[in-house]
Amino acid sequence: MLDYDGLGAALADKSNLADGPRGKLLDTFKHEIATLMIGLRRIQVVGRNDRPVDTAKICDLCDCPVEEARVYIDGKVKRAGVWANMCLPCFLERGSGIGWGVGQLYWHDGLGWQCLAGGPPGPAADDEID
């Protein structure tokens, strides 16, 4: 069961945003964060990233095709010290989290792969700032 109440409470506690606790928060709530970001994209709350990205074809951990699932995470593998392209089930079991320097969540919207979460903080170089 997803714990969005726990995620909300953890985000409200500013001490969880420091580097050490941030990693624990990202790991503890990785399923909630991934599901939330996919849902927010579906209802067009988070925007499209028009920059092309290198895309994965298969999960590096279980060899399943990620194109069929329309989602994958390029992120750190816990206790392995390496990064991998992971399907959602492998990410939930072995991924470190979603966030800059931890992992990026990619979604295929029918037009191409888009980075939904975990990309560079702040506006992209091609974003307009008013």
Image (tube, grey):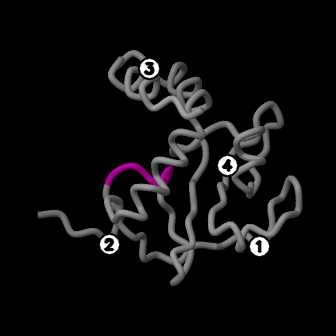
Percent across and percent down for residue 15 are 39, 15
Mark 4–mark 2 distance (CA, rounded to whole Å): 24 Å
x and y, in percent, of residue 111 in the image: 51, 84
Amino acid tagged 3: Asn
Of the pair 57 and 68, the residue shown nearer to us: 68
Query: At 46% from the left edge and 47% from the top edge, which residue is drawn?
Result: 36
Image marks 4 and 2: residues in contact by CB distance under 8 Å: no
Marking on residue 75: 4
- Residue at the spot 45% in from the left edge and 32% down from the top edge: 4
**Compared to 31, does 68 lie above or below?**
below
Task: Find the magenta span and give its range.
Answer: 117-122
Name the residue carrying label 2: 126
Identify the element where label 3 is drawn.
helix
| Residue 17 visible to an observer of this rendering | no
Predominant secondary structure in magenta? loop
Task: Decide if residue 44 is on the left or right side of residue 84.
Answer: left
What residue did someone put label 3 on?
16
Q: Give the residue pinned by disc 1.
A: 57
Select label 2 or label 3 by which is in front.
3
Q: Amino acid at mark 4?
A: Gly
Distance in Å between CA atoms under marks 2 and 3: 31 Å
Picture quadrant of residue 28? top right
Which callout, 4 or 1, points to the residue nearer the camera? Answer: 1
Relative to 21, does residue 106 appear above or below in the rendering? below
Q: Could you tell which of marks 4 and 3 lies nearer the N-terminus?
A: 3
- Going by the numbered disc 1, the residue's amino acid type is Lys
Residue 70 lies in the magenta stretch: no
Viewer-side label of 2, 1: 1
